[in-house]
Image (tube, rainbow, N blue to C red):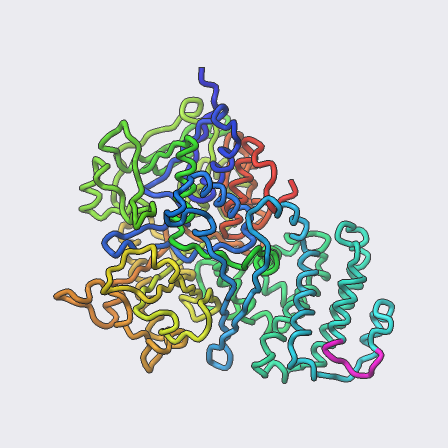
Amino acid sequence: MNNKKKIAVLGGGLGSLSSVFAITSNPNWQSEYEITVYQEGWRMGGKCASSRDPQMADRIEEHGLHIFFGFYDNAIKMMRDAYQEIDRPLQAPLATFETAFKPHSFIAVQEYINDKWVDWPIFFPPNDKVPGVEANYEQDSYDSPLGMLYWLLKNLKQQLRSNAHLQSYTATKDHAMLAKISHLVGDLFPSEQHSVNDIIALIEHLLDKTLQGAEKDLQKLAGVVADIEAIIKTMLAIYEQLFGPTAYSLQSIRQLLLAGSFCLHIIKGMCADKVFLLGWDCIDKYDFRQWLKRNGTPKNVYCSAIVRSFYDLYLAFPKGDTNQSLCGGNISAGTLLHAYFLSCGQYKGAIFWKMQAGMGETVIVPLYQALLKRGVKFEFFSRVSNLGLCTARNSIDNISIEVQATLCDPASDYQPLINVKGLDCWPKDPQYSQLVQGADLKAQNINLESPWSPWQPIEVKTLQRGVDFDQVILGISIGALPYITPELTATSTSWSNMLQHVQSSQTQAMQLWLKASLEETGWKLASPVMDAYADPFNTWADMSQTLPRESWPQNHLPGSVAYFCNNLDEPQEIPPFSDHGFPAREHLRVKENAVNWLSKHSGYLWPYISDSDGGLQWQQLIDLHENTADPRNGAERFDSQYWHAAINPSERYVLSVADTNNYRIKADKTDFTNLIITGDWTDNGFLNIGCVESTVVAGFRASRAICGYPERIFYLDK
């Protein structure tokens, strides 16, 4: 008799794969569970999916831009384990985590000052920490608002002390101001003039005296918060006396002063709203910029590039509207503040870890292969269309699955991967030869991932509780849930509220393969990850490290490849799935956005390959049709590049809009006894924002709700 619990995993995105990876990391899992993952279409990955196009030099085609941050301990540990488990030959490409991910330390944000763009290069020094290793469990205590205070003050002190240009600034001392904290600072200021050293002295006093021992004693911390705020207010006053508005006009120090003012106003706001005592979430009812303004932050700071860059990074523009991106958007204040600290202050090794190939083959393939090896089953071409409740309305009783295609050999499993230069990858299209319907799918150019496709299911099968599943892990993203969970919405107020309040956005992306190397484009800085540039493609990364994994012919070798992404503003109303032309219209709209943008904005980035009007020289694009009888010219050459409109409900980017995170639901608090949820749309208890680490933590929380494993999760106390 088989007493194993059957788990149906709906969706094959990173949240689902993380959940299953965690469950099956328990050495005894096979004695307790049978797990089947149901995935629409021909590839895994969800928003993290990517593929290869054999007709276009096996090039990598992504949904957007994906880079790991150095604080991704859970995600990186999972990838280390997956690479070790699939045990590729050492001479194989991407054989280990260390060969698949490389550190990157340079960021370039852009400021729009006096009607022109100005570079703000930021180098984050590498450190000797290693991400995703057991030793990092001991560093969880640093991930706290108090830890952020320590980091901000130490960083500000270092920057002020190391900048020789600031040392000459002095201002008249305001004794009334200093009197407010005289009981704390004593004889710190014997002279009659302020200097940068006065601010440094205050910082040192705060670090060495006021906060000493407070980290583990919240009662003591509560007693000194007023003193902290008084010191910060004094720092700000000295800061303004020293530098004033004229200093901000000097390019050599303006960016440092903006960053310093940003740090001090953050600390002031954290004191005023008791973030040190109440935690990050206590200010999530405010938008981050709204919170900064509420605490007296000047406009040149809350509208600065260091603020805008994180709005761009987390696509923080509801309905994809970036018209006010220079000083608009909406994202939960505490959540973004936490993300700042993790990204910039808690990284291990480097701030970024860049993948050396596509997300699909660098992340999703190793997870898929490891899970196959462990005995997990995968059902491709299985689109979930409905979750049905039992008579009591408290559990999932049945699941409707639309079968999109059937295998020529029903006794075999679908083999989804292709080999590109020794590396297993997801192809751009299904393996038509394995499918009964393959010829028709190919002839009609059907996209099985699009709900707007005219393709009809071959059959609709019903998974029944007690027969096909006992427990359900729902990893399909929130944009699709209104379509497949109407019974849950009608039954559960918390479910209905989550779907009503937690928002998502369409996104757009383009990839350009250029003849010129990065240096030959005229880009004047190091290989960048760049944010806060001109919309609608404000984010760019040089991803030329991926080119060796593609198969370009010798007479069409790219010198570099550039990835861009951003929000995509939405139509007034998303059309019904019966409007089969909607994907083509959105695809064309992204193309028009890209061509228009490249005609106006590439010149600042790449002056050597742009025309006098600031537009791209189109002949600089790699085009395999170049030497044919009918070559493309001018902007038509853009047709040889790749662009993507992420409009499918399940691939929309999940937002963290102010006052909405409280509507998210924890993995095992769904009101339905056998339903566990996972993904970056759930309440993961760590960082409710759209990123890989949040998704993996959500996956681990889902696993823990089912089997109590893993016992430890980075950044979570319990």
Q: Is residue 285 visible?
A: no
Q: Tell me the residue at 20%/45% (across/down).
A: 442
Specify whether 546 is left or right of 350.
Answer: left
Region of the chain picked out in magenta, as a range: 190-197
In the rendered view of the protein, which quadrant contains the C terminus? top right
Specify whether 123 is left or right of 567.
Answer: right
> Is 681 within the magenta?
no
Q: Residue furthest front?
A: 91
> Is 194 within the magenta?
yes
Q: Nearer the viewer, residue 666 or 686?
A: 686
Q: Residue furthest top?
A: 1
Q: Quadrant of residue 298?
A: bottom right
Q: Nearer the viewer, residue 165 or 340?
A: 165
Q: Tell me the residue at 84%/67% (across/down).
A: 184
Q: Position of residue 386 (x, y in %)?
A: 39, 35
Q: Is residue 416 visible?
A: yes
